[in-house]
């Protein structure tokens, strides 16, 4: 990511960092970045419809002037041309650029921004509830309406200096990674709830795509998807990246909304996006076609608690193993859920703590059954302290259904890291 973007994000974050912790202000920053992206994309789309496809765009003031000229001449015609292509239409007085103009003239009001959020959320299921976690009335932004207005005005100005279209790839993901890296100490365990380091993500994506590079359509599933970046990485390794269908579930509603933003920012249309805000360790999802996938990837919360209720002994995901993961350690519950949803021809990769390789009792029984089935293809030992929020060493377990052999490839990558200030970084 460009140094300039780093500095701009830091400046934006700096406005909020003294008011709330990183786990809270990321919602404001990333939500506003998303809204700005959609606004600026709309101005570019209008410009290209009027002037033809181009790689170089004039200043946004020129784009905005062209937009307003068409809007005032025939707004219905403009909306009919733009909305079907984009899947949304932002009114002139609700564009991010318009908010910036008002901010510069000391005319901006938070109610204007809230109206923009509300209107976009009404424009389709994929936008519904996206901005629910951005509380513009929070006293953390200021003790009164005027102070809150000043705070968001400063953030708007700082963010509007960022040209998101100069940065290819995972724009919002890069923003996550930078902000998490800078403020992980302040966010503590919360920082790791929704992000898998890129080096680990690349390994899992490459391995789970081997032998399936030309498959189209390609269906990927992440039952603990966080911000969705782990799923999105698969595109790098496929011949037809625009034919990937993304299926994901996330328990935390705030993180679920971030994942939706992330996929939309990457040009994933609603027909290729099947996301659910729910508990993977409760009722099974998805239960309708497609419910088995070419690739299953997962970095679930480690040794989480779950009910382990007797009813799950007859659940198709777990019944063949005769045992359930213990209440205090849901690691194998996540693993078996993902394995159940894997196609016979597919590959699964899951990150788990080392304990899953050695613990006995029910976990030992499940592990032995998987080994006898030949389901465990490889185990990759990762370095300690490479994930935000935990320093424990972890392992990537690769699983397949169609193996005739029972051997397991063990790879020790525990020393393949570069030590940095607060975090180890896995080497490619």
Image (spheres, rainbow, N blue to C red):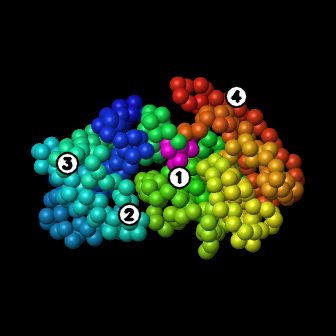
Q: Is residue 233 left or right of residue 367?
A: left
Q: Which residue is mark 3?
A: 144
Q: Does the segment drawn in magenta span residue 197?
A: yes
Seen in the image, is 135 located left or right of residue 360? left
Counting residues from the start of the chain, the first of labels 3 and 1 encountered is 3
Between residue 41 and residue 261, name the one nearer to us. Answer: 261
- What span is colored magenta in the figure? 190-198
Q: Nearer the viewer, mark 4 or mark 3?
A: 3
Q: Classify 205 as above or below 76.
A: above
Q: Would you place residue 158 above or below residue 53 in this image?
A: above
Marked residue nearer the N-terminal end (4 or 1): 1
Q: What residue sits right under mark 4 in the picture?
A: 415
* Residue 405 position in % (x across, y down): 88, 53
Q: Earlier in the sequence, mark 2 or mark 4?
A: 2
Say which of marks 3 and 1 sits in front.
3
Residue linked to disc 1: 226
Q: Is residue 310 magenta?
A: no
Image quadrant for the N terminus?
top left
Locate the C terminus by quadrant.
top right
**Crowd band around label 4 with a 10 angstrom C-alpha radius: few (<14), some (14–19), many (20+):** few
Of residue 1 and residue 55, the one placed in the foreground of this image is: 1
């Amino acid at each position: 990511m460009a140094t300039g973007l780093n500095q701009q994000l830091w400046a934006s974050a700096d406005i909020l960092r003294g008011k709330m912790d990183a786990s809270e202000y990321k919602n404001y920053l990333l939500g506003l970045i998303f809204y700005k992206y959609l606004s600026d994309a709309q101005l570019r789309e209008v410009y290209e419809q009027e002037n033809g496809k181009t790689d170089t765009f004039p200043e946004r003031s020129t784009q905005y002037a062209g937009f307003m000229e068409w809007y005032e001449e025939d707004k219905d015609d403009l909306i009919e041309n733009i909305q079907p292509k984009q899947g949304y239409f932002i009114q002139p007085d609700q564009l991010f650029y318009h908010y910036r103009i008002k901010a510069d003239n000391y005319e901006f009001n938070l109610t204007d921004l809230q109206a923009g959020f509300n209107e976009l959320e009404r424009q389709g299921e994929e936008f519904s509830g996206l901005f629910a976690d951005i509380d513009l009335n929070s006293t953390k932004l200021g003790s009164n309406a005027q102070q809150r207005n000043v705070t968001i005005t400063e953030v708007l100005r700082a963010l509007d200096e960022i040209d998101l279209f100069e940065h290819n790839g995972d724009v919002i993901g890069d923003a996550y990674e930078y902000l998490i890296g800078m403020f992980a100490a302040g966010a503590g365990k919360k920082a790791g709830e929704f992000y898998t380091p890129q080096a680990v993500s690349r390994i899992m994506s490459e391995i789970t795509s081997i032998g399936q590079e030309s498959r189209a359509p390609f269906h990927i599933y992440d039952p603990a998807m966080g911000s969705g970046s782990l799923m999105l990485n698969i595109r790098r390794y496929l011949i037809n990246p625009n034919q990937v269908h993304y299926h994901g579930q996330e328990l935390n509603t705030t993180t679920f909304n971030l994942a939706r933003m992330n996929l939309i920012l990457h040009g994933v249309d609603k027909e290729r996006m099947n996301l659910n805000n729910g508990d993977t360790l409760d009722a099974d999802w998805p239960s309708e076609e497609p419910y088995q996938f070419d690739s299953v990837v997962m970095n679930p919360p480690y040794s989480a608690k779950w009910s382990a209720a007797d009813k799950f002994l007859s659940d198709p995901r777990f019944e063949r193993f005769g045992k359930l993961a213990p209440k205090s350690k849901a690691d194998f519950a996540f693993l078996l859920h993902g394995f159940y949803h894997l196609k016979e021809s597919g590959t699964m990769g899951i990150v788990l703590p080392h304990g899953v390789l050695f613990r006995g009792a029910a976990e030992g029984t499940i592990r032995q059954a998987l080994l006898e089935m030949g389901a465990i293809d490889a185990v990759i030992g990762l370095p300690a302290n490479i994930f935000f929020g935990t320093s424990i060493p972890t392992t990537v377990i690769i699983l397949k259904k169609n193996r005739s052999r029972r051997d397991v490839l063990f790879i020790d990558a525990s020393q393949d890291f570069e030590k940095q200030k607060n975090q180890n970084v896995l080497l490619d």
